[in-house]
Image (cartoon, helix red, strand yellow):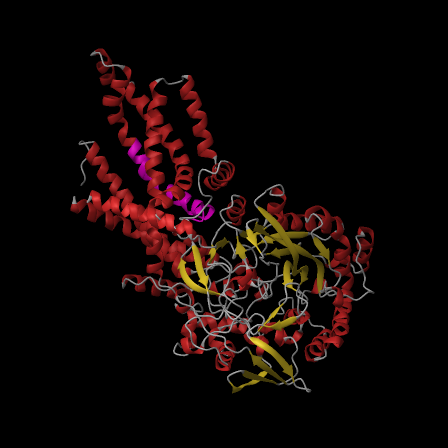
């Protein structure tokens, strides 16, 4: 196991560096820099003043040099400071992590439970009315962009029905866990929709595939009901592709959360990331990229470990 | 353990019950949504927007009234200008205290002005204080500014400049002060409200300042909630969760029948213009620029796209007192436009299509740009729009490698506001004249206007500027649109009006209240 982990880490390192280099080049290739973002376009600093600020921030150095300096800095455990307000990047990111984790895992949990459950329901009577209805909903869920669904949900459930607060993390002056939970329901549900749809489709086809196998016929032959056979024999054997899908979609989920956080003014890393891009805050953008890359890598390794746990035939070497 | 928990719950319930009895008057608004906002940037001396919020806890020396007609004192009780116009003496209000209890004096004013003029701070106000040669403080209630030449617009600049406490900040180096923690952790001002707390990406909470020089505010708390998406703020306003937000015209239309808030509107004081790169050879002939003006059906655009909520501009000014009566109206006339283009030999010089840059990303502006493109194409001027965000736009325009922009520039309340954008002395890299305008007669008039100390004589000078910009078209003036805000029905006495960058007017926040 430790050897496996070490190997995985070593294999990931080049990918990791390539991602960082690519993002660094891309954010720097976008027109405008932090100094341009410093003031709105209507009323700006003179070019002279801007050049002075650029020199001070080291923005006038060649790109490879800046990337090298940044890597060296990260190797020393320092993510630098935000250009926007001079706050340490590490502290800024860490203060947003709990909100993002809460939203992502709420979406993931809700999505996994509902997606798998609905997939099983659909697989129970394939091509039945219920299966058809669920498939239709799944297509809608997969094709609806999360930010659009977010605004729609906000309009219906917050404004028309008044069940949930429109946006934000907590009511100013409250902030109790019930209050936060109340704010969490809407964004987490919207985030999970796409995930439910994808997972439902995979669970359904995976279970149907297993059902055509010999041992399933044996199970019905020995007198198990359709549901019993489904839950005790088909489902466990269908789990591997389901876990793969959950793991592989984790990054998509984080991506969806970035935009959804903006829609719901959720004070997490997504909101922070968009703010970083708008202000061309390179240290912040790179810091978040690094953090997300690590998180996704960790989830991939975790997925491999779970494989071995649910299927003894797979060993981690 | 169970006992402890139930005790805690009981305590919580009791506190809530007590809280309900002596209900705090709390006003929650989205004060930094929209073009006037500057969300989560807390140094007002390096800001160019967000003043609506800053002057809830800081004060300026002077302020406009809410109609932007005249400037009167805020921290200054009054001022006098010397006969030669080269010295301004400010008499400061007596008995004003900083939020930490220390007295406010002339030293704080001198400290703030020196700070802003220090290049290390990178303040946008620094160039506007270039003519200041000395600041003296003969006594704690008096500040004297000496100037190299008369400078009437300096009072307008002072309506933007928040005065900060010397005793709190003198120990921090100017470079560090630009982004110091102080601004977002524990700022100390003189305003009606005091800083209480800041939850990043969520809100800032201010509490009433009982020692405010105009009296204790009626509200106990004023909260500025952050919305990354203006649409969410508009929904929150309709749902009654917040009591104020900036609104776009589309949002106003959608919410006309709501019972939760009333809409307030006013002129944005931002002139939308077609910016010609004056160094571009294809625009050399004034007939080309005139033709482009006549190709655009501005009246229809204002009527159908802006719903009538904009005022046409035929020169760079739209305020009555600065608009000359004898202007070319550039009425929509595509036939005349084609004729002018033919006279200027457009077909032989037109070259590649003109790139039309803009930093506006909202739907209305996109519709406007598409209309401009179609109407210009109709007379034979091919235009390709390019949408950039603010930083991208600044970078491209600073470089000089552009032909045409659709942009906005504050044209009031002080007419000199436009000087840095049109005076050739401000040509890049030194200044902000990014359209590379070089008209000596315009430069001369701007100098005259700035140095004229008699208020009655200034309008005639700016009318002349209006005539020159109407005839020579260094910019293609389009219109000044209205902007909107929504104020919740439970709110009393709240004053809000759009202004470039927000704020700068006396809104008497100490009298705001909520039912």
Question: Is residue A249 at all visible to an observer of this figure?
Answer: no
Percent x, y of residue B33: 53, 54
Is residue A264 within the magenta segment?
yes
On screen, residue A67 above or below B174: above
Is residue B19 within the magenta segment?
no
Q: Is residue B63 left or right of residue B25?
A: right
The residue nearer to you, when weighing B96 against B143, is: B96
Percent x, y of residue A278: 48, 56
Question: Is residue B67 at all visible to an observer of this figure?
Answer: yes
On screen, residue B238 above or below B72: above
Quadrant in the rendering for residue B436: bottom right
Percent x, y of residue B178: 44, 71
Quadrant in the rendering for residue A314: top left
Q: Quadrant of the N terminus of chain B?
A: top left
The secondary structure that dominates the magenta segment is helix
Q: Is residue B432 left or right of residue B302?
A: left
Percent x, y of residue A143: 47, 34
Q: Is residue B33 left or right of residue A177?
A: right
**Which residue is at 23% across, 14% downward?**
A224
**Which residue is at 51% across, 43% downward?**
B239
Q: Which residues are magenta?
A: A242-266
On screen, residue A131 above or below B278: above
The residue nearer to you, when weighing B406 against B112, is: B112
The residue nearer to you, when weighing A131 against A68, is: A131
The residue nearer to you, when weighing B314 against B212, is: B212
**Which residue is at 60% across, 50% downward?**
B248
Q: Is residue B339 left or right of residue B127?
A: right
């Amino acid at each position: 196991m430790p050897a496996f982990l070490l190997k995985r880490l070593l294999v990931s390192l080049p990918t990791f560096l390539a991602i960082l280099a690519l993002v660094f080049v891309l954010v720097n290739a976008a027109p405008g820099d932090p100094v341009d973002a410093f003031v709105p376009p209507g009323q700006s600093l003179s070019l002279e003043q801007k050049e002075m600020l650029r020199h001070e921030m080291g923005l006038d150095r060649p790109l490879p040099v800046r990337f090298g300096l940044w890597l060296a800095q990260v190797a020393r455990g320092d993510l630098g400071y935000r250009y926007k307000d001079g706050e340490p990047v590490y502290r800024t990111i860490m203060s947003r992590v709990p909100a993002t984790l809460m939203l992502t895992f709420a979406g993931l949990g809700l999505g996994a439970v509902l997606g798998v459950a609905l997939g099983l329901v659909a697989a129970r009577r394939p091509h039945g009315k219920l299966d058809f209805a669920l498939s239709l909903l799944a297509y809608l869920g997969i094709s609806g962009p999360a930010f659009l669904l977010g605004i729609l949900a906000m309009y219906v459930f917050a404004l028309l029905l008044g069940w949930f607060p429109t946006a934000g993390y907590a009511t100013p002056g409250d902030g109790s866990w019930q209050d936060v939970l109340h704010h969490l329901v809407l964004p987490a549900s919207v985030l999970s929709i796409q995930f439910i749809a994808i997972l439902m489709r995979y669970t359904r086809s995976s279970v149907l595939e297993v059902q055509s196998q010999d041992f399933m016929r044996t199970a019905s032959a020995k007198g198990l009901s359709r549901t019993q056979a489904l839950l005790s024999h088909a489902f466990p054997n269908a789990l591997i592709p389901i876990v793969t899908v959950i793991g592989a979609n984790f990054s998509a989920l984080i991506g969806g959360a970035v935009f959804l956080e903006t829609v719901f003014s959720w004070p997490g890393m997504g909101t922070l990331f968009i703010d970083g891009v708008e202000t061309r805050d390179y240290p912040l953008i790179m810091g978040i990229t690094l953090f997300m890359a690590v998180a996704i890598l960790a989830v991939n390794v975790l997925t491999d470990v779970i494989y071995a746990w649910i299927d003894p035939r797979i060993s981690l070497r | 353990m169970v006992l402890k928990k139930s005790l805690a719950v009981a305590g919580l319930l009791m506190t809530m019950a007590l809280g309900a009895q002596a209900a705090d008057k709390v006003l929650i608004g989205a004060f930094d949504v929209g073009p006037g906002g500057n969300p989560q940037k807390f140094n007002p001396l390096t800001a160019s927007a967000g003043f609506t919020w800053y002057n809830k806890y800081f004060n300026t020396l002077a302020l406009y009234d809410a109609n932007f007609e005249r400037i009167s004192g805020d921290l200054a009780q009054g001022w006098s200008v010397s006969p030669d116009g080269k010295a301004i003496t400010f008499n400061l209000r007596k008995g004003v205290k900083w939020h930490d209890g220390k007295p406010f004096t002339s030293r704080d004013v001198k400290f703030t002005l020196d700070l802003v003029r220090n290049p290390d701070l990178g303040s946008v106000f620094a160039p506007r204080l270039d003519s200041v040669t000395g600041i003296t403080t003969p006594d704690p209630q008096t500040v004297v500014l000496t100037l190299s030449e008369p400078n009437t617009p300096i009072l307008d600049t002072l309506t933007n400049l928040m005065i900060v406490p010397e005793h709190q900040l003198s120990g921090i180096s100017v470079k560090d002060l630009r982004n110091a923690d102080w601004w977002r952790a524990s700022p100390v001002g003189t305003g009606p409200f005091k800083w209480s707390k800041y939850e990043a990406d969520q809100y800032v909470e201010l509490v009433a300042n009982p020692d405010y020089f105009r009296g204790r505010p009626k509200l106990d708390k004023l909260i500025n909630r952050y919305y990354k998406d203006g649409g969410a703020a508009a929904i929150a306003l309709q749902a009654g969760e917040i009591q104020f937000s900036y609104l776009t015209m589309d949002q106003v239309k959608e919410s006309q029948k709501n019972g939760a808030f009333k809409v307030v509107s006013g002129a944005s004081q931002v002139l939308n213009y077609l910016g010609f790169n004056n160094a571009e050879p294809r625009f050399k002939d004034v007939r080309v620029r005139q033709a482009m003006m006549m190709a655009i059906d501005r009246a229809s655009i204002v009527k159908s796209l802006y719903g009538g909520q904009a005022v046409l501009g035929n020169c760079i000014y739209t305020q009555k007192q600065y608009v000359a009566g004898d202007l070319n109206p550039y009425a929509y006339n595509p036939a005349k436009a084609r004729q002018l283009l033919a006279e200027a030999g457009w077909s032989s010089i037109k070259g590649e299509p003109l790139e039309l840059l803009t930093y506006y990303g909202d739907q209305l502006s996109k519709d406007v740009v598409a209309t401009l493109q179609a109407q210009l194409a109709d007379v034979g001027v091919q235009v390709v729009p390019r949408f950039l965000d603010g930083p991208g736009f600044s970078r491209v325009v600073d470089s000089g490698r552009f032909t045409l922009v659709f942009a906005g520039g504050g044209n009031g309340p002080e007419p000199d506001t436009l000087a840095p954008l049109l005076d050739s002395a401000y040509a890049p890299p030194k200044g902000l004249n990014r359209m590379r305008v070089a008209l000596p007669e315009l430069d001369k008039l701007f100098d005259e206007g700035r140095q004229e100390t008699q208020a009655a004589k200034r309008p005639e000078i700016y009318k002349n500027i209006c005539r020159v910009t109407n005839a020579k078209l260094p910019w293609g003036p389009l219109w000044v649109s209205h902007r909107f805000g929504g104020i919740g029905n439970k709110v009393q006495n709240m004053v809000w009006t759009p202004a470039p960058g927000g704020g700068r007017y006396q809104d008497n926040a100490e009298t705001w209240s909520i039912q």
